[in-house]
Image: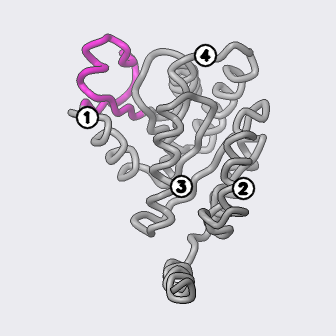
Amino acid sequence: MNRICVFCGSSMGYQRIYRDAAADLGRLLAESHISLVYGGAGVGLMKVLADTVMQYGGEVVGIMPQHLVDKEVAHPGIHKLHVVDSMAERKSMMISLSNGFIALPGGFGTLDELSEVLTFNQLRLIDKPLGILNINKYFDSLLKFFDQGVSEGFVREEHRNSLIVSFEARSLINKMNTWQPVAMGKWIDDLKAESQSSR
């Protein structure tokens, strides 16, 4: 992977651990010669991440819709800022430019981006690793929701397990480098069989 897209908050969060984790990831990306693709903001964890990548000599590419640029939240100092027309176009470009994805703590926007990549991988529209950096156990409740989806028959276990989770950035990237996509044919055939058996 030479480009990783990071989804994270435009807020800092209340605890210092989140800012430290964003900075640690930014330094690791730069030192590993992995370019950062992100939402282009100059606020919150997004700013900490981008600033740290650049501080250690890494490349930063931002993608932001025009309406957010107009609100003056774009980072003025990154190497490249792609200005797009919509949030949907932003996500599409993030996905196309990146070899893998990491979610740091964030809000609804982070959840939206995480869910889209999960779904695209499930449908084999893309085959790119997605990791969660579970700082301070921030994502534990979401992961329990995914587990409940498996236990209730709405999420396939292999898709749940394709989501890579770690508390430490280097370990997460190492796992992402060995990730393999779930074979689509098998689970589609299983769905057809389940539908036929329920008739």
Residues under numbered marks 2 and 4 in contact, where contact means CB atoms less than 8 Å apart: no
User: What kind of residue is marked 2?
Assistant: Asp
Mark 4: which secondary structure? loop
Circle 2 or circle 3, nearest the eye:
2
**Which residue is the site of mark 1?**
86
Residue 100 in sight in this render: yes
- Which quadrant of the figure has residue 160? bottom right
Q: How many marks?
A: 4
User: 1 above or below 29?
Assistant: below
- Between residues 141 and 66, which one lies in front from this camera angle? 141
Residues under numbered marks 2 and 3 in contact, where contact means CB atoms less than 8 Å apart: no
Mark 4 → mark 3, Cα distance in angstroms = 27 Å
Circle 1 or circle 2, nearest the eye:
2
Q: Earlier in the sequence, mark 2 or mark 4?
A: 4
Q: Residues within 10 Å of mark 3 (few under 14, many from 20)?
A: some
* Residue 34 spot, x, y in % from top left: 54, 44
Would you say residue 140 sits in the magenta stretch? no
User: What kind of residue is marked 3?
Assistant: Met
Q: Which mark is residue 1?
A: 3
- Between residues 197 and 50, which one lies in front from this camera angle? 197
Q: Which mark is residue 147?
A: 2
